[in-house]
Image (spheres, rainbow, N blue to C red):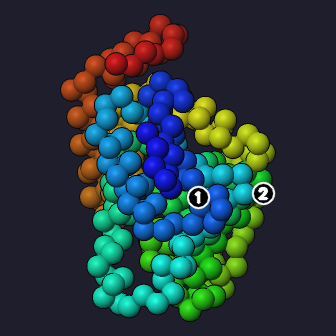
Amino acid sequence: MATLDLLIEERPASGVALLRLNRPQVLNALNLALRVALAQAFERLEADDATRVIVLAGGEKAFCAGADLHEYLDAQPLEIVQRRMDRLWDAIARCRKPVIAAVRGHALGGGCELAMHADLIVAGDNARFGQPEVRIGLMPGGGATQRLTRAVGKFRALRLLLTGQPIPAAEALAIGLASEVVADDQVEARALALACELARGPRQALEFIKEAVIEGMNLPLAQGLQLERKSFQLLFAGADPRLGIQARLDREEPRFT
């Protein structure tokens, strides 16, 4: 399935869906049409039982260079409110399935925020991450003040947010803004390899792990631990723990249902 601004490549591997931003002429800048297409794609793939893992990719020069500024030049507050960007971001944030961002080139502003909606970020060695909104008199509006701070801590986050200065992939990895860094020409191959590994894993356990981590970030420690315990206990209602344990005892690779 394809749209003007978002190309969806179904099933590069079993259980894996690849979404590619497809506005290379503007470095994959996020306009409203692309945001809507992304939200619709995530909602569709979230409901698709055949999809186990989602990979989100851009192009060689840019994962996503941020918002399309043409749509903001003369915007008024009420118009911005009526765009309901929160619903479009939430469609990605609410996805229960593992999401992997394959980042090459620029991941700036809304592009960095989009990457931070993923669960794993595989970055190319020439990738650059940043939140440059302050340099045009704005601030992040897609979650960076919260997600970035949770990922890298107050002082590192504020350095990026207040200065607008981008950082290279190696620094992003060092401060916790990327999962791993590989050569640029290996980014998508590595992301797909990770996706295939996860797609073969226990679906319910992966979902519960993601939920416990993300929800637990917003809970006091005691409540987060309670969520973890209940999720752990519920896993025994399915067949995967028995299959996995038996395979380990037999020194075989498990084949989850």
Residue at the image position 76 percent from the left and 47 percent from the top: 184
Residue at the image position 36 percent from the left and 71 percent from the top: 85
Disc 1 crowd rating (10 Å Cα; few below 14, some 14-19, many 20+) is many
Mark yes or no: residue 56 visible: no
Q: Of 22 and 251, which appears nearest the observer?
A: 22
Number of the front mark, 1 or 2: 1
The residue at the far top in this view is: 250
Mark 1 = which residue?
Answer: 23
Circle 1: residue type: Arg
Mark 2 = which residue?
Answer: 126
Q: Position of residue 147 (x, y in %)?
A: 47, 68
Q: Position of residue 58 (x, y in %)?
A: 61, 52
Q: Is residue 163 left or right of residue 219?
A: right
Residue at the image position 48 percent from the left and 78 percent from the top: 71
Q: Of 236 and 43, which appears nearest the observer?
A: 43
Mark yes or no: residue 28 visible: yes
When the figure is inspected, residue 50 is found, relative to residue 5, above or below; the finding is above
Q: Is residue 180 left or right of residue 75?
A: right
Residue 190 placement: quadrant: top right
Residue at the image position 47 percent from the left and 33 percent from the top: 10
- Quarter of the picture containing the C terminus is top left
Q: Position of residue 116 (x, y in %)?
A: 51, 60
Image marks 1 and 2: residues in contact by CB distance under 8 Å: no
Q: Of 205 and 27, which appears nearest the observer?
A: 27
Residue 220 placement: quadrant: bottom left
Circle 2: residue type: Asn
Alpha carbon of mark 1 to alpha carbon of mark 2: how far? 20 Å
Q: Which mark is residue 127?
A: none
Secondary structure of the residue carrying numbered label 2: loop
